[in-house]
Image (tube, grey):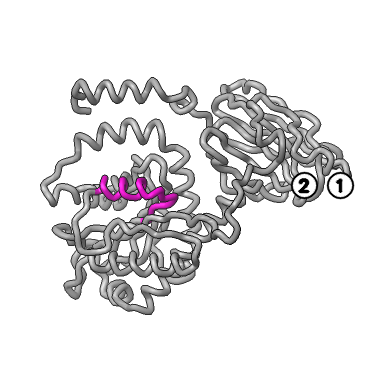
Amino acid sequence: MPRLGPRLLIAVLALLLSLPAAAVARPAATEVRIAPAEQVTEIAIAFTGAPRYRVFTLVAPDRVVVDLDECDFRLAESARAGSGPVKAMRFGLFQPGTSRMVLDMAGPHAIQTAALSARPGGGSELVLRLAPVTAGEAAGRSGQIAAATLVQTASLVSTPLPAVKPKTPGAPPPRIVVAVDAGHGGVDPGALGVSGIHEKLVTLAYAREIKAQLERSGRFKVVLTRDRDQFLRLRDRIDLARRAGAQLFISLHADSHPDSSFRGASVYTLSEEASDSEAAALATKENKADLIAGIDLSKENEVVTSILIDLAQRETKNLSAQFAAMLVKELSRQTKLIRNTHRFAGFAVLKSPDVASVLVELGYLSNRADEKQLLSASYRTKLSQAVVKAVHEYFDWQESLKRS
């Protein structure tokens, strides 16, 4: 890493000193074991650290809620399916500083005991013992804290649901802000298609279509990082989305490949370790976009990456991966995908510390069939519909966590 100047060094130290200890070494949930039984069901959640917790039940529908110090979730996808009386499990960031796990139950249950203990190999384990109760008993316990080492908030004392600000009569709910980034632009044309079309024109057309479809629903406000043929630094694209208050960042690309037979769509999320050599090569190429305009941000990027990525981005990566999975599912219904569709690489444009971000390769302009599709208005509409559907699904999922 390059030597830091005095001002930057002071700023870095101030940032590090202002961060809570949990931000530096945040615990992670690594495993869930469910041992169903007729009388008592035991649920054990393993952590790398020892987070504080708060446990309570809710009814209509029946749920068990576990609030934790903000943590990462490294649980297998199969954990979401549940087992026995646990029909399904949801988990994610509930609010800054607090993560939440929600167990959807097949019937009313009460929490007999909840305790956190050290594991022999390191870390800790939160063990819940749940027993079936009558609907009346469950209703009487709903929202009451059964066990807690995490400070109980005022909103939880009064009601199991988050407080809602009163709305002005007739006022529509605030729209969710989504940033759509048309890759390349201006002096950076991107890939060149077999017919001579430039990538920057293709991505802009798709960005405009996605914006139109999302805003048509009335639920979203869409910010385009560019709405004309202009050059933007990679960091400026991120900053624009963050200043607009975006909760999701979608960067669109249509690259080329040395093998002209290679085709299909793919979705990338951030990782400093690429999922394969192709992903690494693509990230390296895209990250050089700033150099085309004579701007060398390599030194700044190392500093920003070392601070933001390591200290502030863990939960953002989890949210990005969740949206990527939904997007891959929707794209698979509309178009051809490359093998291992969800990939990981160190794209600079995905390094926002607090906005879930994905990069979508719409297809390959070096492949004649892909290019023909990408230039078709009807195909653009269809592919954009898949992206829009995934965006709706993602925010439906986010709202379900908040309602839990």
Is residue 275 visible in the rendered structure shown here? no
The reply to whether dot 1 and dot 2 touch (C-beta < 8 Å) is: yes
According to the picture, the residue beneath numbered tag 2 turns out to be 59
Q: Nearer the viewer, residue 269 or 165?
A: 165
Q: Considering depth in this image, is 124 or 211 the residue closer to the camera?
A: 211
Label 1 Cα neighbours within 10 Å, binned few <14 / some 14-19 / many ≥20: some
Magenta segment: does it hold 171? no
* Quadrant of the image containing the N terminus: top left
Figure quadrant of residue 261: bottom left
Q: Which residue is mark 1?
A: 135
The residue lying at 81 percent from left, 45 percent from top is 108
Q: Is residue 117 above or below residue 367?
A: above
Query: Which residues lie in the magenta part?
Result: 234-250
Residue at image position (37%, 50%) is: 244
123 is higher (above) or lower (below) than 281: above
Image spot of residue 164 (x, y percent) = 62, 46
User: Is 297 left, or right, of 155 in this rendering?
Assistant: left
Callout 2: few (<14), some (14-19), or many (20+) C-alpha neighbours within 10 Å? some
Residue at left offset 31%, top offset 72%: 374
Q: Which residue, as the protein is rendered here, is positioned at the far front? A: 169
Residue 39 visible to an observer of this rendering = yes
> Hey, what amino acid is under mark 1?
Ala
In the rendered image, residue 27, in percent from the top left (x then y), is placed at 53, 29
The disc labelled 2 sits on which kind of residue?
Val
Question: Gap in Å between the C-alphas at discs 1 and 2?
Answer: 8 Å
The quadrant where residue 149 appears: top right
Picture residue at 57% right of the left edge, 41% below the top: 94
Labels 1 and 2: the sequence-earlier one = 2
Residue 311 x %, y %:
40, 31
